[in-house]
């Protein structure tokens, strides 16, 4: 009969009335769209992490150096690295030139024997118990 549909069941069938969808060359599948969106979201997340780390690194850049031990410690306090009086006193009492071979008052990692030391790390370590 000419008016009867082809392709499957009658009423209630999922394929009833849906024409055959031919494969179109170059057509994008749903999976490709989902995959692209996932990659895009991953890239955006990675960029946000990189920007955050750059902001943190620039904020924590070694800016507290001085011409003397006293100036170094006072700059660390002024820049918010040293927060408590007790840590300030301890850091002021321990001159870095006794341990660092060169540029002892530069606010940057210094070689001490086989390890490295950093004023900011030392201050944060000392500040920990006082919070």
Image (cartoon, helix red, strand yellow):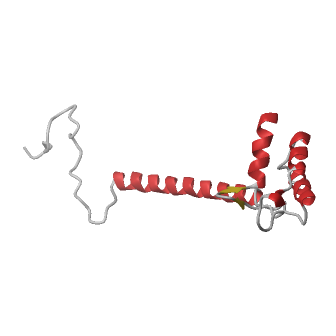
Residue 67 location in percent, x, y? 90, 66
Q: Quick check: 15 above or below 27? A: above
Q: Residue at x 77, y 61 (%)?
A: 100
Q: Quick check: 84 above or below 52? A: above
Residue 131: which quarter of the image? top right
Residue 107 location in percent, x, y? 80, 61
Residue 96 location in percent, x, y? 82, 57
Residue with the most extreme top position: 12
Q: Residue at x 82, y 35 (%)?
A: 130
| Left or right, residue 79 beside residue 18 | right
| Left or right, residue 44 beside residue 23 | right
Residue with the most extreme left position: 1
Of residue 111 and residue 106, the one placed in the foreground of this image is 111
The quadrant the N terminus occupies is top left
| Left or right, residue 1 beside residue 80 | left
Does residue 96 appear in this view? yes
């Amino acid at each position: 009969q000419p008016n009867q549909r082809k392709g499957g069941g009658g009423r209630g069938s999922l394929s009833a009335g849906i024409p055959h969808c031919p494969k179109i060359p170059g057509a994008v599948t749903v999976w490709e769209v989902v995959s692209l969106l996932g990659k895009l979201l991953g890239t955006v997340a990675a960029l946000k992490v990189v920007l955050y780390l750059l902001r943190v690194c620039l904020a924590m850049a070694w800016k507290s150096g001085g011409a003397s031990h006293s100036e170094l410690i006072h700059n660390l306090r002024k820049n918010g690295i040293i927060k408590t009086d007790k840590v300030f006193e301890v850091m002021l009492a321990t001159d870095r030139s006794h341990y660092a071979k060169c540029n002892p008052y530069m606010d940057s990692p210094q070689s001490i024997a086989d390890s490295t030391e950093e004023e900011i790390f030392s201050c944060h370590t000392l500040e920990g118990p006082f919070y």
